Image (cartoon, rainbow, N blue to C red):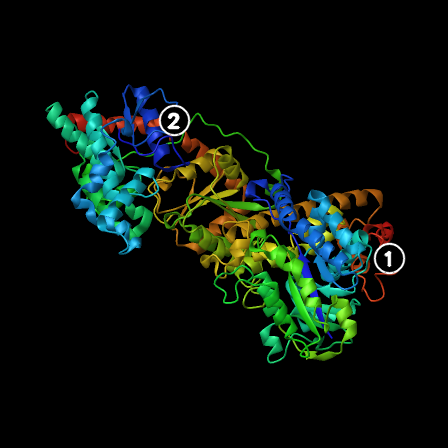
Amino acid sequence: MLGWELPPYNSGGLGTASLGLTEGLAPLGVSIRFVVPKLHGELPYTHMEVLDATDYGSIDDLRALINDQTIDEAVLASTLGYGNRMSRDEKKRLWVQRVEEGSEQPSPHIQATWYATKAKHIARENDDYEVIHTHDWMTYYAGMAAQEVARKKYKRYVPIIAHVHATEIDRCGVNGDPRIIEIEKKGLAAADRVVAVSQYTKEVIHRHYGVPREKISVVYNGIPSHKEPVKFDLAKLKEKYKIVLFMGRITMQKGPDYFVKLAKAVTDKDPNVRFIMVGSGDMEQKCIEDAARAGLTGKMLFSSFLRGVDVDRAYQLADLFVMPSTSEPFGIVALEAIQNGTPVIVSKQSGVSEVSENMIKVDFWNIEQMAQEVHQVLSNPAKRKLMRNGGRKDLLHLSWQDSGRALELVYQDVINKLRPASL
Amino acid sequence: MTSICFYFQVHQPYRLRPYRVLDIGSETSYFNDELNGEIARKVAAKCYLPMNQLLLEQIKKYPGKFKVAFSISGVALEQFAEYTPEVLESFKRLAATGQVEFLAETYYHSLAALFNADEFRAQVNQHVLAIEKHFGVTPTAFRNTELIYSNGIADLVEDMGFRVMLTEGADRILEARTPNFLYEPHNGRGMKLLLKNYKLSDDIAFRFSDRSWASWPLTTDKFTTWVHAIAGNGDTVNLFMDYETFGEHQWEETGIFDFMRQLPGQLLAHRDFEFATPSEVATKYWPQAKMDIPDAISWADMERDLSAWVGNPMQDGAIEWVYKVGDLVKATKDQSLIHQWRKLQTSDHFYYMCTKFWADGDVHKFFSCYDTPHEPYVYIGNILTDLEMAAESRLTARSIRKTRSIAAPAALPARRVHIETAIPRHLVVEAPTRAGGVGQPGHSTSLHHLPHTRNLAG
């Protein structure tokens, strides 16, 4: 399995999902070798073997890549700020130095190619494998490299599963980075099977990347079932106000601007509702200013990213959780809210809306309807209770064990047939 | 004879703690005590202590001749008492020379003059009491926060009995006139106006160490020549600046202390020049003209208007909310809570939220303890949410106590009775007009000793 982020850095996201999947697979007897680009310290996992990509190949792999003439253009583009004061070679040297220090991000192509170089070494130096499982664009080239090694070393065709947690289209819409989209297209075409985290994402992959539907299987994400949140005493604030929460990256994909519009629409009718936006991101300052401009000072509060138990405290503080994402492949946050006993409204443009009937589903752009739903939920304790209890029941079928079982079936299918399965 | 009138502004705000959403209701302090103490000690060592010593030496060197004025905000005095008592002591030594005048301002260095006249008067009275307590003198001259001034504010101040008020000699109010004379408010009844000579003041405060300035380096000789050039063309040269100019904004290495050490002697070398404090200047000369200033001016930024503190939606939203919760907070009569609320009124909080030129890394950024203007807005939002709840819960607790002790009519909500009686009492007790009031023996009774509770008992 070729991952990108471990241990999970933020709640939700690629790290959480890939870790959850391994925890679901391991009990089924699947042995997992999990590769990460770089390990920071010891990891506490016993259910799989974790490999650090930087332990393989040469330390000069990155330098060699950057010196490759074919990527010259990317190098120059990212050092454009220096104008003519430096020669091209000087710029290149400086840039290589910065990338190695970690102060500069190499272009997507180099990141993916570097990981592929490492994967080649890892595949050569480790035992045989039956399936190559990749997670999102950063790992696609690496998967292809590992497949190539198997063809040469074992004279065998090892299938690639490309697991899609999010696409560039979800993150940025039509303004996506064409270089990333290019890598995604190549990776998805090379995969023997694509796994989407929802039907919603399956459609995105089909429509935007031209992958035939028959080649795409859906495996929903789960939520750690053993984790029963600690209860917090937040009576003071809850007693006085009804609280509506947003939690996530404050970026276009998550629809924070729709949350601000919702806050305006709701508090205009009911000034006793408070909106809280938790998270950080490139739209944070814009949202704060927009809220102030809309007269929401005092009605909308902000918090930067929360970690650890504070995440649960925030969920429990809320009477309602809203996820107005404009395009959300899954949306684990909604399940975390339910786990903390908080009813949720999610946008129809999300994967998580497929897994439970005990959520309210609204188009992200339909502020009027969303506001109506907020009023209804907040003024109707019976409805809240119903949603809370129903949602909790749904969670019972949404463990990572369930995801693991579904994924194992996909593995079997691919290995047995080595051709697309019908759905 | 031309007077040279030095006035130094001494102020330190209570900077806000990064107060998080999850801190609401947790009784966490609103203010960053650690940072405030650290800054107070740093500025004391770099500026207040050495500069006070320097001024004291000069005053002793020129007895009866070298004079300066200070305005020290109440929140600065409080922090000196808490973090650097030696600073307070050194100001007291200056006061004891009799050659230093202390001006009145709002205790909390607030913008109350723009938003709430009662609140403004209450804070000015509180500041007068604090100056009397620490320095044994009663201020007769007034400077409003950041020299903010308008016809309306002048009326308020004159009604309180002040004889002199200081403000900025902004170009757009002076037009072709000079700041080197006394003026009168538009509807003045005898109060005098002193206008800052911003050219000469800013030569010291802002340009002293600016190497790109044509007149750098600024020597005492050069500056003295400029001041003496005014002889015969003005009654007063008003040099108004932040006291932190000395050692904090202009570091010791720039030579600012040596400059100031030589300045009094050199300025006094011309027999037509003398030092005078604002109240002395006001009694010496006749006003030149009336100043009509309907829109507020200030000494901040190039604009010399209010745009440093109000105007962007974050500033406006936060200020509106601060003043909106006032009646509720005051109704609790909880002095500690009211004090917390007033500390939130300090103008600096809104200055930090200013987005003008933020990207260019301008002066607002230099003076801010936050990375972005959005941070203090977010913190004060959380703090005000907590404050509002704290005030409400205190009122509820009181009204429960009251319904128990006196048999209130069942139909009348006890809490409303409270608020209604509280507001008129506040007006009477906390906001007396100053005319003839403060300064009389025995007046400096602390506010909370006055008989608040008489009406309530009945």
Which image quarter: residue A402? top left
Residue neighbourhood size for the residue with mark 2, other residues' Cα within 10 Å, grouped as few (<14), some (14–19), many (≥20): few
Callout 2: SS: loop
Q: Nearer the viewer, residue B121 or A236?
A: B121
Q: Nearer the viewer, residue A105 or A186?
A: A105
Residue B443 disc label: 1
**Three-letter code, disc 2:** Gly
Subunit under mark 2 = A
Residue at the spot x=55%, y=47% of the render? A379
Q: Can residue A294 be seen?
A: no
A89 in relation to B95, above or below: above
Callout 1: SS: loop
B400 in relation to A163, above or below: below
Q: Nearer the viewer, residue B200 or B256?
A: B256
**Three-letter code, disc 1:** His
Q: Position of residue B61 (x, y in %)?
A: 75, 58
Please state if A326 lies on the left or on the right of B175 as rendered. left
User: Which residue is disc 2 drawn over?
Assistant: A41
Please state if A289 lies on the left or on the right of B399 as rendered. left
Q: Position of residue A372 (x, y in %)?
A: 48, 52
Dividing the image into 4 quarters, which one contains the C terminus of chain A? top left
A277 in relation to A115, above or below: below
Q: Position of residue A340 (x, y in %)?
A: 49, 34
Q: Can residue A119 be seen?
A: yes
Q: Position of residue B330 (x, y in %)?
A: 73, 53
